[in-house]
Amino acid sequence: MAGSSSSTASTNPLFGVQVSEKLTKGNYALWSAQVLAAIRGARLDGHITGATAAPSMEIEKTASDKTTEKIVNPAYQEWFASDQQVLGFLLSTLSRDILTQVATASTAAQAWQQVCAMFTAQTKARSLNVRLTLTNTQKGNMSISEYCGKMKALADEIASSGKPLDEEDLVAYVLNGLDDDFEPVVSAIVARNESTTMAEVYSQLLNFENRQALRQAHASANAAVVVFSVVAAAAVAHVGAAILLLQDVGAALEEIRLGVVMTAPSAKCA
């Protein structure tokens, strides 16, 4: 058994090669990247691109008596064995739903072409929808970290379709979705002659956001001081008025007391 496995591995370069996930309706780009890497590493990619064409199945052999006969072409047998190895590897990486649609393929090239045809239109439509989402996404109430993270995730989704988004385009999408508060930093970035990376843009936006937050905190603190001063002054004024009122009341009571004493009848001598 061990000898048989060793022999199989030596004659089939794809033996034992595995991909992290089977092909489904939502992971075509990731699947194709892994599968292509494995097949190219085995130097068998010509079987899916068509570059390694099948030789003639039969060749003519001339006997010693000058007669000819057709025999199986050894080159075709070798090609067919390699092609079936690639086909078997491809089929092993498909989910059941996808496998049922390509199970009739007899060569690796046929299976590959059928899979590509199934997903090409879907990938283009998905990429277009993500680009529209990038165009319409606004920062709104999100922080810069949340906003840039969301935009980067959308860009990564486009990249997974096989056509990565240019960094300059991503920068343009990000700047387009900012509100008027960020106009100073947007103008500064746009005015630069050299291209700006997304990392640089993120750093500048984050610094600007932090400065704005500090200014707002300082303004709020100043406003709180003003309000406290006004309230304190009002309280002092009220206290002063109350003291004056109490003094007036006290004076009035004193006057009443004195008046009562002065008008009281004098005691008669016995």
Image (spheres, rainbow, N blue to C red):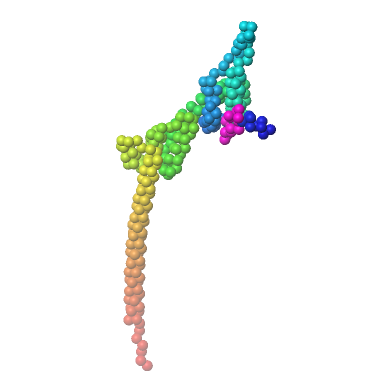
Quadrant (top left/top right/bottom left/bottom right) for the N terminus? top right
Which of the 4 quarters of the picture holds residue 67?
Answer: top right
What type of secondary structure mainly makes up the magenta span? loop
Residue 99 spot, x, y in % from top left:
61, 26
Residue 42 on image: x %, y %: 55, 28
Residue nearer the viewer, 127 or 8: 8
Q: Quadrant of residue 72?
A: top right
Q: Which residues are magenta?
A: 10-23
The location of residue 180, given as percent across then percent down, is: 35, 40
Q: Is residue 105 visible?
A: no
- The residue sitting at 51% across, 25% down in the picture is 120
Q: Nearer the viewer, residue 125 or 231?
A: 125
Q: Residue 164, can we see it?
A: yes
Viewed as shown, does residue 35 lie left or right of 267? right
Give residue 217's position: percent from left, percent from top: 37, 52
Residue at image x 32%, y 81%?
Answer: 262
In the picture shown, does residue 209 fall above or below 115? Answer: below
Nearer to us in this view, 21 or 121: 21
Residue at image coords 58%, 18%: 75
Name the one closer to the observer, 212 or 234.
212
The extreme front residue here reads 64
Considering only vertical position in the picture, is 270 above or below 118?
Answer: below
Residue at 64 percent of width and 6 percent of height: 65
- Image mark count: 0
Instruction: Spot the residue most to the top.
Output: 66
Q: Is residue 19 magenta?
A: yes
Along the horizontal axis of the image, is 247 left or right of 116? Answer: left
Question: For residue 21: magenta?
Answer: yes
Q: Quadrant of the C terminus?
A: bottom left
Q: Quadrant of residue 48?
A: top right
